[in-house]
Amino acid sequence: MPALRLSASTQDLTHAAGLLTDGGLVAFPTETVYGLGADARQDRAVARIFAAKGRPEFNPLIVHCAELDQVKALVHWSEAAQSLADAFWPGPLTLVLPLRPEAGISRLVTAGLDSLAVRMPAAPVAQHLLRIFGGPVAAPSANRSGQISPTRAAHVMADLGDRIEAVVDGGPCAVGLESTILGLTGTPPTLLRPGGVTAEALCDALNTRIALRRETDGINAPGQTRSHYAPRAGVRLNAVEFEPGEARLGFGAVDCDLNLSPAEDLTEAAANLFEFLHRLDATGAPVIAISPIPHLGLGVAINDRLSRAAAER
Ligand code: TXA
Ligand code: MG
């Protein structure tokens, strides 16, 4: 049975919450990307996320909540966490904190770790769904493992439509890149994945330096698998000139097939990135060639995703 397509109406979101309660998988829009949600307390439901995505079970999931009190019941909260929540929640920031084992989160969510990744999404549709459901929702990006992330309901339908109960269609995602993940289980805080909130903004809010995760540090964020976010086509980065036959993804004043941002606006480029990769991949071109993206602000997260899309598979 193909997934049910639900709207963002209260009636449809109530239905979606009921599906989650029954152990179902429901994809829903956040401001970053579409998430594939399941009740984080139900082992069977969480196991189905890994099966539907083809995701290795050692890769833990992020739990989404609408209320701070809910979050505090799941993890050991700290002063640093409070400063960051004050500055960035709800929004595209995930915090990794010590898990409260008594909180009832499925061990599959944390892949057996004693920490938990938590986030409070800003998108009104996500908040509304989480409020109606009333519990913690585990949600990775709603794509098959290793593929381009979904920023439209249609991306989810194409990738997972035959494996999940429903997709809530809330239109395109405003940020378009996954959340920034910050580890708060050690000192100093560690940036585990660059994303919608920049490292500079985190340092400002915390008033401390933060460490960058090194590639050799082992399990952590989607980055640990070097190849990720990969289209079917090959990917050529920092293309200053385009070759015949390539699908051309531009940035700034260049002649190309699709332009992430003619005005060189990194926020606009982030919002367009995955949709444009999906579109150019669908043309069947053997290679997608991409203009250089400035490595500052949101450009750091964009370049992180692009380097993984281009990595050897
Ligand atoms: O923007 C987002 O974060 C989206 C939306 C749906 O919220 N979600 C998302 O989930 O990107 P996912 O599964 O694609 O990436 C989450 C990453 C995982 O790859 C995992 O490595 C990391 O978060 N993670 C989860 N729990 C962790 C933990 N306890 N310690 C370190 N990293 C963790
Ligand atoms: Mg993902």
Image (cartoon, rainbow, N blue to C red):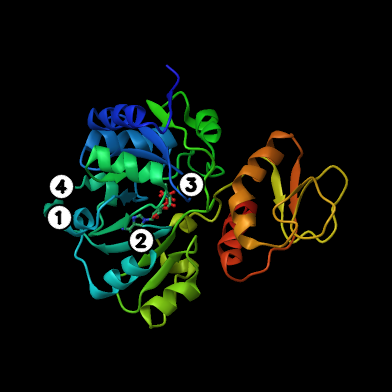
Question: In which quadrant of the rendered view does residue 53 lie?
Answer: top left
163 horizontally vs 247: left or right: left
- Pick whichever of labels 1 and 2 is earlier in the sequence: 2
Question: In which quadrant of the rendered view does residue 98 lie?
Answer: bottom left
Quickly name the residue at label 4.
104
Does residue 156 sit above or below 310 in this rendering?
A: above
Quickly name the residue at label 3.
33
In this rendering, which labeled residue sits more in front, label 1 or label 2?
2
Question: In which quadrant of the rendered view does residue 131 lie?
Answer: top left
Q: Position of residue 168 (x, y in %)?
A: 42, 32
In this rendering, which labeled residue sits more in front, label 4 or label 2?
2
Amino acid type indicated by mark 1: Pro
User: Viewer-proximal residue, 4 or 170?
Assistant: 170
The local crowd at label 4, few if under 14, some if 14 to 19, many if 20 or more residues have their Cα within 10 Å, is: few
Q: Identify the disc placed on residue 101.
A: 1
Q: Secondary structure at mark 2?
A: loop
Amino acid type indicated by mark 4: Gly
Q: Position of residue 19 (x, y in %)?
A: 29, 28
Q: Is mark 3 within 8 Å of ligand 1?
A: yes
Does residue 131 sit above or below 304 in this rendering?
A: above
Circles 1, 3 touching at the beta carbon (< 8 Å): no
What's the CA distance linking mark 3 and mark 4?
26 Å
**Residue located farthest toward the front when viewing the structure as drawn:** 10
Which quadrant, please, contains the N terminus? top left
What's the CA distance linking mark 4 and mark 2?
23 Å
The local crowd at label 1, few if under 14, some if 14 to 19, many if 20 or more residues have their Cα within 10 Å, is: some
What's the CA distance linking mark 1 and mark 2?
24 Å
What's the CA distance linking mark 1 and mark 4?
7 Å
- Pick whichever of labels 3 and 4 is earlier in the sequence: 3
